[in-house]
Amino acid sequence: MQLETGKAKHGMVGTLTSIIREEGVGKLYRGLVPPLLLEAPKRAVKFASNDFWGKAYLALSGESKMTQQLSILTGCSAGATESFVVVPFELVKIKLQDKTSTFSGPIDVIKQIVKKEGVLGLYAGMEATFWRHFWWNGGYFGCIFQVRSMMPKAENPQSQLFNNFVSGAVGGFVGTALNTPFDVVKSRIQGAAKVPGVIPKYDWTYPALVTIMREEGPAALYKGFVPKVLRLAPGGGILLLVVEFTLGVFRQALGPPYI
């Protein structure tokens, strides 16, 4: 949906039906390997860098505890850090998912990109990916802080799990609402074939946002929003729930000073 230029021909259901009818069910899973390989290191970097930047900003600001502003800044910094890990995997995924793709698989994508553009070619779309993760994580962690402060204090582990899920789900929704335009631009940049001597239509993020809005209208910046938010809103809640639960288990196992 995000690679499609002009007025969208189908919604989410129409796109699914069209892909199955024209290309088969297997096409729905094309490009699955890169996200699967990326998931664990991506989430580890996200939360580890959020913890690192949180401590760094607390020390720099002189605050004794996290504030709303610091939580947003910390999240944005975590997203910026995470983006450096993500780019090559996202590039391979986009190349495979393009309807016109002739690549046989992830390894073929990597080999051909390195052959034609060198190793740095794997970082095409780095700037757009940076902004995509910068805004998603800022919205995600900023909302978690705010929603947690508004919810009743958890009286037992079950209530704590519920609070974490709700906070993460709201954060996932807001993060997706903030970053979808940048995701559309990233997909356009990474999906375009490079032609020697020709300036790409989509090159830098913010000028590309203006180009898409001018040529296709503001709604084009939110192509693919529904399937994204259906995945990332509950996914954000589950992610926070699992991380906090796992950390709690390790803290109990390790004992002081981790408890």
Image: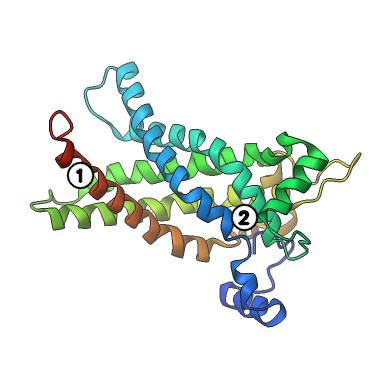
Residue 25 at what x, y percent from top left?
Answer: 61, 77
The N terminus - image quarter: bottom right
> Is 217 above or below relative to 43?
below
10 Å neighbourhood of mark 1: few (<14), some, or many (≥20)? some
Q: Which residue is mark 1?
A: 248
Residue 112 appears in the picture as rendered:
yes
Q: Is residue 55 above or below residue 248?
A: above
- Drawn side of residue 27 relative to residue 176, left or right: right
Outermost residue, bottom direction?
21
Find residue 24 and report its image quarter.
bottom right
Which class describes the residues within 10 Å of circle 2: few (<14), some (14-19), or many (20+)? many
Above or below for 28 versus 140: below
Q: Position of residue 11 (x, y in %)?
A: 60, 73
The residue beneath circle 2 is: 221
Residue at 56% x, 35% y is 84
Front disc: 2 or 1: 1
Secondary element at image label 2: helix
State the CA–CA distance, disc 2 to disc 1: 39 Å
Q: Residue at x 9, y 53 (%)?
A: 156
Which three-letter amino acid code belongs to the residue tagged 1?
Answer: Gly
Where in the figure is residue 37, as x and y percent of width and height? 52, 51
- How was the colour assigned to the protein in this rendering? rainbow
Amino acid type at image mark 2: Leu
Name the residue located 31 percent from the left edge and 46 percent from the top edge.
144
Q: Secondary structure at mark 1?
A: helix
Number of the label disc, if any, that sits on residue 65? none
Residue at left offset 26%, top offset 47%: 246
Q: Quadrant of the C terminus?
A: top left
